[in-house]
Image (cartoon, helix red, strand yellow):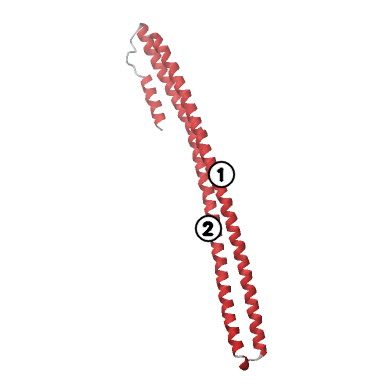
């Protein structure tokens, strides 16, 4: 991180031997500056560590969890869409079968003189069964459609809640960052005042 680099550079400056031979108030001022630089380097290192542990790491963890939640929602919606498509295909298949059996029944009815009554009864029974199958498929499709709609509403609400949590998380960590930055600024200000007094 750039803050760590700044801290290392400040530490190097605090070890600089320039003006080390100066005496009197100038020597005291220089010694104070070097001490302030060393203290500031330490504060920057602590600031960097806090930023990583209290801001960056929580945000990264939240981001990973957010991606997992989004992936779960996507998979759930995809599964529901597949189920809905499957139910619709079943309805189409049952409708096609009913149409074919009704056509067959009409043909048998028209050819009544050439067919036995038993054939007609069988055709009626098959047609009725096929109609029942169609109604069952329609019911299952309607149930799947209703479930899909409910899940869409639920998932939308969950996504809205996740977005609220994401925004709140970012806001909290921005506040945390601002507080840490304020602490560093206050420390930097406190280190300048003794030097100003010596000069």
Q: Mark 1 — residue?
A: 161
Q: Mark 2 — residue?
A: 78
Q: Point out which mark residue 136 bears.
A: none
Q: Return the disc, 2 or 1, that comes first in the chain's sequence.
A: 2
Image quadrant for the C terminus? top left
**Residue 53 visible in the shown view:** no
Distance Cα–Cα, label 2 vs label 1: 20 Å
178 up-or-down from 77: above or below: above
Image spot of residue 161 (x, y percent):
56, 44
Image spot of residue 195 (x, y percent):
40, 12
Position of residue 72 in the picture relative to residue 115 (left or right): left
Position of residue 148 in the picture relative to residue 17 (left or right): right
Task: Tell me the SS state at disc 2.
Answer: helix
The residue lying at 52 percent from left, 51 percent from top is 71
Q: Nearer the viewer, residue 187 or 119?
A: 119
Q: Nearer the viewer, residue 143 or 198?
A: 143
Image spot of residue 107 (x, y percent):
58, 86
The residue lying at 61 percent from left, 69 percent from top is 137
**Residue 150 visible in the shown view:** yes
Image quadrant for the N terminus? top left
Q: Residue furthest top?
A: 24
172 up-or-down from 125: above or below: above
The residue lying at 38 percent from left, 11 percent from top is 29
Quadrant of res 146: bottom right
> Local crowd at mark 1 within 10 Å, few (<14), some, or many (≥20)?
few
> Local crowd at mark 2 within 10 Å, few (<14), some, or many (≥20)?
few
Q: Nearer the viewer, residue 60 or 73?
A: 73
Q: Nearer the viewer, residue 195 or 169?
A: 169
Task: Tell me the SS state at disc 1.
Answer: helix
């Amino acid at each position: 991180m750039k803050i760590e680099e700044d801290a290392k550079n400040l530490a190097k400056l605090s070890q600089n031997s320039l003006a080390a031979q100066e005496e009197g108030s100038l020597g005291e001022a220089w010694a104070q500056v070097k001490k302030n630089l060393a203290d500031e380097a330490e504060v920057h290192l602590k600031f960097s560590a806090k930023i990583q542990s209290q801001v960056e790491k929580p945000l990264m963890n939240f981001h990973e969890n957010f991606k997992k939640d989004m992936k779960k929602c996507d998979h759930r919606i995809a599964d529901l869409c597949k189920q809905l498509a499957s139910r619709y295909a079943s309805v189409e298949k049952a409708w096609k079968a009913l149409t074919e059996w009704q056509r067959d029944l009409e043909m048998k009815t028209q050819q009544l003189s050439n067919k036995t009554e038993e054939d007609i009864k069988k055709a009626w029974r098959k047609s009725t069964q096929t109609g029942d199958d169609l109604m069952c498929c329609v019911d299952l499709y309607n149930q799947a459609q209703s479930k899909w709609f409910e899940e869409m509403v639920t998932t939308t609400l969950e996504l809205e809640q996740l977005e609220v949590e994401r925004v709140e998380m970012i806001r909290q960590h921005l506040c945390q960052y601002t507080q840490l930055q304020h602490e560093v600024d206050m420390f930097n200000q406190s280190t300048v005042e003794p030097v100003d007094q010596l000069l």
